[in-house]
Image (cartoon, helix red, strand yellow):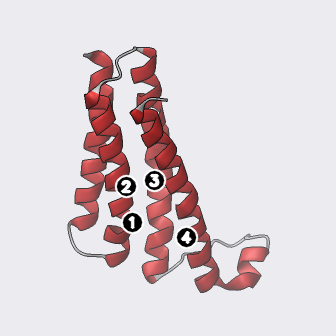
Amino acid sequence: MTPDLYALAAVVLLAAAQVGLASIATLKKAGPRWVLGPRDKPFDVPGASGRIVRAHRNLLEILPQFVAVIVLVHLADSVSQISTIGAWTFFAARVLYIPAYVSAIPWLRPICWQVAFGGLLAVLVDAFV
């Protein structure tokens, strides 16, 4: 397996860990009755717990694009140090995105997001080089 595929596996494990954190945060705020019920009425998780949930959703929004660029670089047989660095940059920035989002420190979350997106773009560029 190539280093960028290991990064993809790490991102998938990160998503799994985040779903656990988001579930715990939701249970903590919404209570077991809502979590175990039919969830007919949405529950907006407030505070830091809500930020954990939203950080997970944000990862799920960008994950298909990350998977696509990893697949693309492999189909193009263009895997190199650029795609490896890009993939691991994406992973590291997404890990840092969680505490950045939860802490609500101004500018930190968007910076982490932009660094992660830059990593994704590096992998994409490598597919065409």
Pointer 2 with pointer 1, Cβ within 8 A:
yes
Label 3 neighbour load within 10 Å: few <14, some 14-19, many 20+:
many
Residue ID at (76%, 83%) = 33
Q: Position of residue 30 (x, y in %)?
A: 63, 82
- The numbered mark, 4 or 1, whose residue comes first in the sequence reads 4
Pointer 2 with pointer 3, Cβ within 8 A:
yes
- SS of the residue under disc 2: helix
- Circle nearer the viewer, 1 or 3: 1
15 lies left or right of 107: right
Three-letter code, disc 4: Leu
Label disc, if present, on residue 21 of the rendered structure: 4
Work out which residue is located at the far front of the displayed protein and give it.
1
**Foreground pick, 104 / 116:** 116
- The numbered mark, 2 or 3, whose residue comes first in the sequence reads 3
Three-letter code, disc 2: Arg
* Distance (Cα) linking label 2 and label 4: 15 Å
* Distance (Cα) linking label 2 and label 1: 7 Å
Q: Which residue is mark 1?
A: 98
* Distance (Cα) linking label 4 and label 1: 10 Å
Pointer 4 with pointer 1, Cβ within 8 A:
yes
Residue ID at (46%, 30%) = 68
112 lies left or right of 43: left
Label disc, if present, on residue 94 of the rendered structure: 2
- SS of the residue under disc 4: helix
- The numbered mark, 1 or 3, whose residue comes first in the sequence reads 3
Pointer 2 with pointer 4, Cβ within 8 A:
no
Q: Which residue is mark 3?
A: 59
Residue ID at (43%, 72%) = 51
